[in-house]
Amino acid sequence: MQVAIGIYEGFTALDIVGPYQVFSNVPGTEVILCADHTGIVKDDAGILRFDVEHTFADVPNPEILLVGGGLVTRKLAVPGVPIVEWIRAAHPTTRHTTSVCTGSLLLGAAGVLDGLKATSHWIAYDQLRMHGAEPTEERVVWEGKVVTGAGVSAGIDLALHMVAELHGEEVAQAVQLGLEYDPQPPFDSGAPSKAPAPIKALVEAVMADAEARAMATG
C-alpha cells in the first residue's frame, strides 16, 4: 500500500508526523513524502526542515493521499495551487483521500468535500463551510472514501482508524501499542466545546494573529 503525504512551506509538523509514524509501522506500507519541489521544505515554525525527495508528479496515483494543515492553508486553498491540483487529479483514483487539521481546506479547494460532512481544526469551521462542507467537531469523519481529522493531534487517531479499516483491528492495536499511544492529558480542554470560554477566546486571538502573520509572509 502506498501512502503519499503532501506538504508545503508552512505545514504544521505534527499533522503529518503523527500519521507518518502510524503508517510507517504497518508492514507492506510505502510512505512517500512529497511536495511541489524537491529539497528543503520548512514547517510553520521555520525550525523543522524536511528534505523532500519526491514531487507531486512522482506520485500521481497513491492509494492513500494525506495532507496536513498549517496557518497558510487559507492562502493555499484556491484553484491552481500545486497541492490543490495534485489532490484534484489524484482523488478519482485514490482508495482514500484524507486530511488532518486545516488540510481539509485543501481538500475543499480541490472540490473533494462538496456536500460532505467534514472536520478540521475548530478555528477553521467557517472556512471549511465556505468550501462546501458541513463542519463537525467529531475527531475523525468518514464520508465514503474521504476521511478528515480534527486539529493537529487527531492525525494519530485518523491513521489508526484507517489501519483498522484496511488491515484489521489487531494490526491497528499492535501499532498503537508499539507507539504506546495512550493519551492521558492533564486537562479536559482539548475541544472547543470543553474548554473554558476565556481559554477559547485566548487561543482564538493568538491563532488569528499567527495566521495573519503567516498569510502576510507565507
Image (cartoon, rainbow, N blue to C red):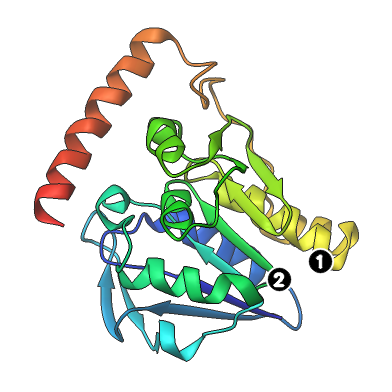
Q: Is residue 149 above or below residue 80?
A: above
**Distance of label 2 from label 1 (alpha carbons):** 10 Å
Report which residue position mark 2 lands on.
95
Residue 178 percent across, percent down from the top left: 73, 61
* Residue placed most toward the observer, 18 or 95: 95
Q: Is residue 106 above or below residue 65?
A: above
- Closer to the eye: label 2 or 1: 2
**Image check: 110 left or right of 115?**
left
Residue 99 percent across, percent down from the top left: 53, 55
**Image check: 194 left or right of 28?**
left
Within 10 angstroms of label 1, few (less than 14), some, or many (20 or more) residues?
A: few
Circles 2 and 1 in contact, beta carbons < 8 Å: yes
Res. 71 in view: no
- Seen at 43% across and 44% down, the residue is 131
- What's under tag 2, amino acid-wise? Arg
- What's under tag 1, amino acid-wise? Leu
